[in-house]
Image (tube, rainbow, N blue to C red):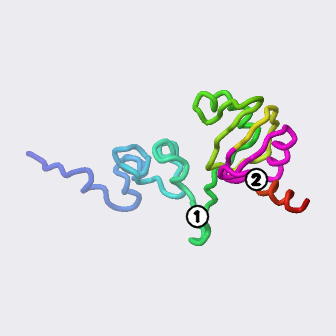
Amino acid sequence: MIIKKTKKAMKMRGRKMGSHGWGARKKHKKSGHRGGKGMSGSGKRADHKKTLVTKLFGNTYFGKQGVTSRKTQRDTRQRINLGQIQLNLATYLKKAIARKVGTGYEVSLPNYKILGNGEIKDKMIIFAKEASKSALEKIKKVGGEIRFDGKIDKAKKSNKKKE
């Protein structure tokens, strides 16, 4: 006598019979117990795929990135310290950003704001967009100057008018 065998899935009914012998339902979804295929299971609190996701998309995938006010604009001015200019002087000479003039150097950084951090040893004339007070003082101590748009800096002009 031939007995028709029904599928296991059909038989398993009743209390605590939802796993079909695989334990938790999530453990039998082809991709192990990682929550499913693709990006599923990579939600807000899921640590299962965090390493994979950060490798692919970086650390900005999870959590808030935030939106600032539309009126707020990021300050995109380029800045450089006097110490960096002193360190990179040799490369500036190669790249024709700087040139030797007499006992000092002329350095052309037209889009930069010059900041006064670091030490400066050589006499320099720096052509820049703007500069901090500390940078102006340090350059003057060494015997150089910072010029804005090819002109002598505004501080020198105002001092001459007062005298």
Whole-percent x, y for residue 57 in the image: 47, 47
Q: Which residue extends farthest right?
A: 163
In the rendered image, which quarter contains the N terminus? top left
Label 1 Cα crowd, 10 Å radius (few <14 / some 14-19 / many 20+): few
Q: Secondary structure at mark 1?
A: loop
Whole-percent x, y for residue 75 in the image: 64, 59
Left or right of residue 130: residue 48? left
The residue beneath circle 1 is: 66
Q: Is residue 74 above or below residue 32?
A: below
> Looking at the picture, which amino acid does disc 2 mark?
Asp
Q: Is residue 41 above or below residue 66?
A: above
Q: Is residue 35 above or below residue 122?
A: below
Where residue 22 is drawn, which disc sits there?
none
Left or right of residue 29: residue 102? right
Whole-percent x, y for residue 132 in the image: 78, 52
* Magenta-tinted stretch: 127-153
CA–CA distance in space, label 2 to label 1: 40 Å
The residue beneath circle 2 is: 153
Q: Residue at x 67, y 48 (%)?
A: 128
Whole-percent x, y for residue 13 in the image: 32, 60
Left or right of residue 94: residue 100? right
Q: Is residue 146 magenta?
A: yes
> Looking at the picture, which amino acid does disc 1 mark?
Gly
Q: Is residue 30 above or below residue 119?
A: below
Q: Quadrant of residue 101?
A: top right
Q: Residue at x 63, y 54 (%)?
A: 77
Q: Secondary structure at mark 2?
A: loop
Q: Residue at x 48, y 57 (%)?
A: 43
Q: Which residue extends farthest left?
A: 1
